[in-house]
Image: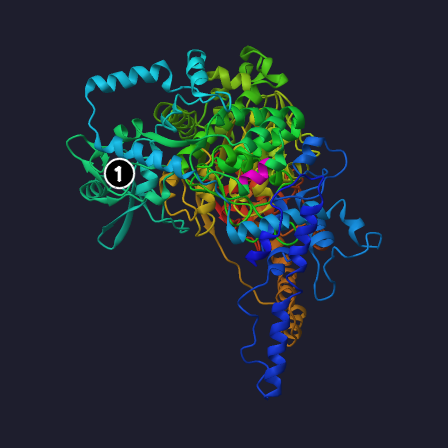
Amino acid sequence: EHRIFKEIKPFSSFEDKNHWISSSVLLSRNGSFAGDEAMLEDIAARGVRFASPKQGFQRPKRMWLWHIVDQHSFRGIGHFSWSAGPGETPEMKELGGGDDSSFTSRYKHLFQNVTGVNPRRDDPPSPKENKSAKGGWQSWEDQYPCVRIAQRDTLRLMIEGPKFLEESEKEKEKQQKTKVEERDSEESDEEEAKKEKEREKGKETENGFDSFGEDEDEEEESNEDAETDLFGGVWSLKEKNYRLRLPLSPTLLSAAVGEIPISKGKSKYVVVLGLYTPEFEKVLKKPSRDKKDDLFDISSELRKELIAIAREGTWPFHSNYLPCEVPGKNKQVTYCKHKKKWCVGGIEWDTLRKNYEVSFNVHSATPSMKHALAEFSFPEFIHLSLWERYRDGIVEGCWVAIRSIIKHILEKMERKGQRILLRSYAIIRRQWTSVRLPIPGLDGGKGSDELMCYVFDKWVYQFLLILSVWVPGALTPSRSVPHFDVPQPDLLRCVKVLLAREIEEMSTASPSSSSSPSSSPFLSIKPPENLLTHQRDTVDDLHKKDQLALERDGFPRRSHFFCLATGAGKTRVAITYILEFLQKDLFASSVVDAVVWLSPLAAIDDIVAEIRKSGVKNVCKMPATGVPKSGYFNVVKDNVIAKFAQSTAEDSLCVAASRCFFVFDEVDRCYNLTQRTSAALECAENCFKSVCMTATPLRSNTQQPLYQWINLGVPSFPLAANGNNGLPLACDMIKKNVDIGIKVTTKLHRFPLEKQYLSQYKDLCNSSGKNLFNLLANVSYQAIDKMMVKIAREVGEKDGGCLLVVRDAEHALRLASRFGTPSVTTDGTVYEAKTGIRVVPYNACRGFNWGSVLGHIVVSQYPGNLSTYTQMVGRINRQGQKKKRSFCS
């Protein structure tokens, strides 16, 4: 297999067809499903010996290359290349672009029409085939070349890995000699001062922006006019070294320590270090879905005792969580009573992180790199990233090279270029020790363990490949496409800062950014007044977290996650915080053009009414184009953004996100791996600022989705892939327990089945089938209908009204036809005059606010009601409720 690669020409221009012909030869040389054939021969041979055909027949362990490539064992092949479509610029074709269809449709086309060949039935194309024949080489001219190149590169990358440039033996000896001299010699203070003076004069350049290929003398002469390095680093071209001070985030210590288990009697607790200030420890219980088991319901005396126990111990420093090379990473974490500070290896954490310095090898740019940069040859860059790259460190002049590449993409590809840059930054922002891009299922849709792929992901992968040429220590292509390894995580931190600055410049350069802060329509809106105590406290806590992040981490807070019980006033809290924040921060008010409010469909009308009630007149529903209306609160159904984010023709929402303030109402709906979650996360990563809120933060025994959303507000926190160190993030969530003094009583009504329903039950129980459970459930629903309406009318007539919760619109129509109940509405505006019954579907209970003037809710036992029980009861147990006792029947 490896010998075949030697026959393949490694790189040639797209005009030369030899390389894609040779890649097809590579495939055809490996035969057609030889593994299946060997297995069938084995079965036949055993059959002759009268062996049981069920014993131990399996495919040979060694798989042939054809299986790996054409059957999509590596589904990342869609990120490598596919044919160029109509209406594209030459630059997009260079990137291997496509038309405005989604990733799913493009991938399906790729699999079905190009690579989805069944060798049992069809022979692979051969170079000997007649060019004029149908299905021969003539049909390959548009689609097959790019795909076969991708197959070849995917296969070679999987087997051999990326190829690194080896330095000459002379250069290695020179570097080794320098290291020995530095280690053994002890220079005097005068010699050290002299060397420092020489470095200032020109032996070291401090810019990293020098022209490629200049002589040393020319470099020394040009140092006087050198620009300051982007990160304040020092380039020593003579010693081939780049060093800089790169302070660490204070959140890294809590991430590295993770959970500190403490037992007190039979009870088990967890102590975590403070997120921004480690000395502000938090104590909590293990996460649980039990309503009686509150994470933070711990007395102050017990809290102090548990923290004291944690401070007495010595705790491991989990280095695998950290995106850096901390000097004390393999040492222990202890609390110094004298300094009253947490220390790593005896060094105070604040001192360690503030004085953190890094040093990287500097490599000279090869002629191929210079040529690719001068010509902006993306195919050549991609080839260099795989087969002619450095192993670590950075390339001389990398920062100016990367900025020029970004500028070229933004100028030539315009809006699509912005999308590529935003998507790239969103993907790498919260990844530290490896970078993983979503991969599709075989149908091009969502993978079993991944989020959605977008059509831009292909270009994002190739853009990151280009970055890896110039900063090889930050990104190295993994053998599994489209992922990356991160040899030196500190360099990836530098790349993130660079992309963040480019995005900020891109956003500032947009036409709407020219408006002055005083022209923002949000400055003239008066925030809601007369907030309840817990609502005002929540708003104040949000402002305090903004200030703390800016003081301790040096970066403004990008997102907040807060939790209030249903009916406790989440909407008012969010509106108040948004308006107060924009009016305090003039820079934010000059950048934010619109507020985008993502909400469940049933709550949209109520939210629009609540926003207007708060004094905001500029509120609307999101336009169908997906472009937020400037100066308005744009309310949109959370499912709709999936359409906006997937369509490249309607990608305005994702591009405009950097100038929007997003609100994710009922964010727990975005926990699952769905199109909605993928689109919501992309908007959250790219928006200027966001607020996430819910009444049910923990919806399952898996905390990873919750941590993922809280991590948006603390992107400097390196959350482990398995979420094992996520509890410090959980403590960052703002949660207010509000007791409004209303008791809710739940009563279960039982009654015998009528004869007609009992006979249907017996008939179904004597039958079989996959749909039997649903059929039995439908009989139960019909049997319950009469009693539901009877109970609702009785309590409604006595109490002045009642909520009657139905399964869906069909269920409501059946009740209306049989018993004359009101028609179903999501806002409850239609009701029965005599009894006050309001009919609402169970999935609309999140936005149904009429419950505050009612005291009863009647529901049936149907699939889904357990997951929404808290929401339904919250409709009657809410702020504004006039009754001291409410009932759920």
- Is-magenta flag for residue 382? yes
Q: Nearer the viewer, residue 785 or 726?
A: 726
Q: Residue furthest front?
A: 170
- Is-magenta flag for residue 761? no
Query: Residue 276, image x and y in percent?
Result: 33, 31
Q: Is residue 486 visible?
A: yes
Q: Nearer the viewer, residue 165 or 800?
A: 165
In the displayed structure image, the side of residue 181 where residue 40 appears, left or right: right
On screen, residue 269 above or below 688: below
Q: Which residue is found at the position 54% from the left and 29% from the top?
A: 687
Q: Which residues are magenta?
A: 381-385
On screen, residue 494 above or below 696: above
Which quarter of the rendered picture does the N terminus lie within? Answer: bottom right
Q: Quadrant of residue 69?
A: bottom right
In the displayed structure image, the side of residue 211 where residue 147 appears, left or right: right
Q: In terms of secondary structure, where does tag 1 sit?
A: loop
On screen, residue 258 above or below 125: above
Q: Which residue is found at the position 22% from the left and 38% from the top?
A: 345
Circle 1 sits on which residue? Answer: 328
Q: Which residue is found at the position 32% from the left and 38% from the top?
A: 254
For label 1, the crowd category at 10 Å Cα-Cα, with few meaning under 14, some 14 to 19 and many 20 or more, is some
In the displayed structure image, the side of residue 119 where residue 233 appears, left or right: left
Q: Nearer the viewer, residue 434 or 174?
A: 174
Count of numbered circles in the view: 1
Query: Residue 396, image x and y in percent?
Result: 46, 27
Q: Quadrant of residue 349?
A: top left
Q: Residue furthest bottom?
A: 50
